[in-house]
Image: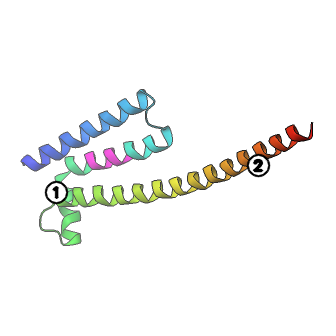
Amino acid sequence: MFINILSVSISVVFLLIVLELVRRQRLKEQYALLWILFSIVLLILSLNVSFMEWIAEQMGVKYPPAVLFLFGLLFCFSLILHLTIVITKLTSQVLRLTQEVAILKAQEALNGKNN
């Protein structure tokens, strides 16, 4: 019973933290929706013990609250993969912009010598 109360408390606190980060504009809306959805799913699973037990039984898990942590871990891995893709794209853009700025500076220096 303690673990259920703990998981509900953590889910609620997590949801409140995400909402506060959005309110302070420290978290973009595109990511906030994902985090809010995740915390609501965790809250629903935490509150509905019989549903969580059924999921655990179907998966062959002996300790039903471990299913919550499994879903949380899978979500974190998915988010890390998504953010890695975003970082890769941004790195390519920064490289391209750096090259364009270098070309513009070289052209500017060349135009300065010609005048």
- Kindly identify the residue that appears in the image at 51 percent across and 53 percent down: 87
Q: Quadrant of residue 105?
A: top right
Q: Can residue 50 be found in the magenta stretch?
A: no
Q: Nearer the viewer, residue 98 or 5?
A: 98
Pick whichever of labels 2 and 1 is earlier in the sequence. Answer: 1
Q: Which residues are magenta?
A: 37-43
Give the label, 2 or 1, closer to the camera: 2
- For this rendering, which residue is in front, 3 or 78? 78
Q: Residue at x 35, y 48 (%)?
A: 38
Say what amino acid the circle numbered 2 marks: Ile
Q: Residue furthest right?
A: 115
> Could you tell me which quadrant the C terminus lies in?
top right
Q: Amino acid at mark 1?
A: Pro
Alpha carbon distance from label 2 to label 1: 58 Å
In the visual, does 38 lie left or right of 8?
right
Instruction: Judge whether 114 appears above or below 26 on screen.
Output: below
- What element does badge 1 sit on? helix
Seen from this angle, which residue lies furthest front? 113
Left or right placement of residue 115 versus residue 85 in this view: right
The chosen color scheme is: rainbow
| Residue in the image at 17% along x and 56% along y | 50
Name the residue: 29% across, 55% down: 72
Mark 1 sits on what residue? 65
Q: Which residue is mark 2?
A: 103
Circles 2 and 1: CB atoms closer than 8 Å: no
Q: Position of residue 7 (x, y in %)?
A: 18, 46
Number of marks in the rendered image: 2
Residue 16 coordinates in the image, percent (x, y): 30, 33
